[in-house]
Amino acid sequence: MATKEAPREVFAVGCAQLGAAFAGEGFVYRTSHPKMVRKLGDFTEEVLLRTSARNEAGDLTQLWVDVTLSSIRMAAWRKKHPAPVTPNWVGGTALGSLLPPTTDWNLSPRSQRRRTLKDAEHAIRTAGLPYLALLRDSAALERELLARDLPGMSPDALIDPLVCFGGVEAGARYAVAVVTRHPDMAARVLAGVKHVRRTGKLPREADGYFDTFAERLVQLKVPFP
C-alpha cells in the first residue's frame, strides 16, 4: 500500500513550484510563511500562500492565495493619518474573491497536481496581479471605483489609498459614488458623517463598514457631502 503524502510536504513543494514559476518576473519566493514578494519602486507586492489546519494525508491539501500591496509612501502618510491597519498597507484580498465560487485547489491528488498548480498560477496572473496593478495606479483605481465596487475591499479600506495618492477631492468623488450606488446606506453614511463631525466619534450603535467609512471621511477631512 502506497504511503500517503503528508500535506505539509505536499504544500511546501507546491508553493516552491509556484514561486519558481514567477521568479523570472521579479518575484522572490520566501519559504517562511510562504509567499512571493516583488518590489516595484515605492510599492511591494506580495502573493501569500496558505493552507488549512484540517488537511488530510492523501486526500486534502488545501491551497489558498491572498494578494496584498504595501507602500513606503502610504506608511509615511499614515503617520499623519493613523488608521487601525498596518501602516504601509494599501490594499489586497483573498484571490478567491476574484474567482468563480466553485474554484478549489487541492494539491493532494498526484494525478491532478500539476494541472492544479497551473490553474492557480493562471489565476494569480490573470486576477491577482491585475488587482494589485489597479491598486498601484491611483487614476485607474478612481475610475474603477466611480463605476463599480471593488471585490474584496470595502469603502472604509479604499478611502485611504484614494486620498493618499489622489487627494481629498478623489475621496469626495468616491464618497458620492458610494452613496449613489448604495442608496439603502446613503442616509446611514450621511448621518454618520454628521455625528462624527459633531461629537468626534461614531454613534454607539455603529457596527458596519459604512459607519467606519463615514468616520474615516471626517478624519481625512474629505469635503463630503
Image (cartoon, rainbow, N blue to C red):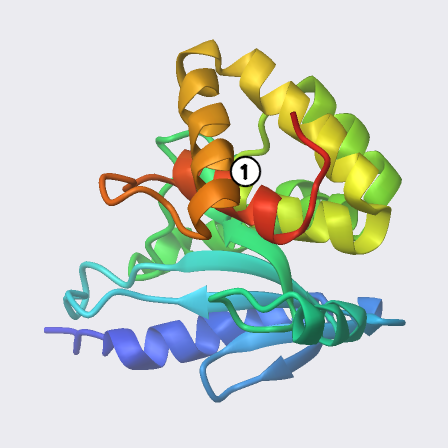
Judge left or right: residue 86 versus residue 199: right
Mark 1 is surrounded, within 10 Å at the Cα level, by few (under 14), some (14 to 19) or many (20 or more) other residues, namely many
SS at circle 1: helix
Q: Is residue 207 left or right of residue 183?
A: left
**Where on the picture, by quarter, is residue 8?**
bottom left
Q: State whether residue 54 is above or below residue 207.
A: below
Residue 137 in view, yes or no: no
Please provide percent x and percent y for residue 191: 43, 27
Q: Position of residue 184 (x, y in %)?
A: 40, 12
Find residue 91 and report its horizontal and vertical position in percent: 61, 55
Which of the 4 quarters of the picture holds residue 164? Answer: bottom right
The picture quadrant where one finds residue 192 is top left
Q: Nearer the viewer, residue 128 or 225?
A: 225
Callout 1, which amino acid? Pro
- Name the foreground residue: 37 vs 72: 72
Quadrant the C terminus occupies: top right
Position of the N terminus by quadrant:
bottom left
The residue under the point 78% across, 43% down is 168
**Which residue is rendered at x = 48% and y = 10% of the image?**
183
Residue drawn at (63%, 80%), measured in percent from left and top? 29
Would you place residue 201 above or below residue 75 in this image?
above
Residue, far front: 198
User: Looking at the image, how many numbered discs can be counted on the residues?
Assistant: 1
Q: Residue at x 28, y 42 (%)?
A: 207
Residue annotated with mark 1:
155
Q: Does any portion of residue 5 appear in the rendered image?
A: yes
Q: Is residue 168 above or below residue 165?
A: above
Q: Depth check: 169 or 111 in front?
A: 169
Task: Give the camera-side residue of 198 and 5.
Answer: 198
Residue furthest to the bottom in view is: 32
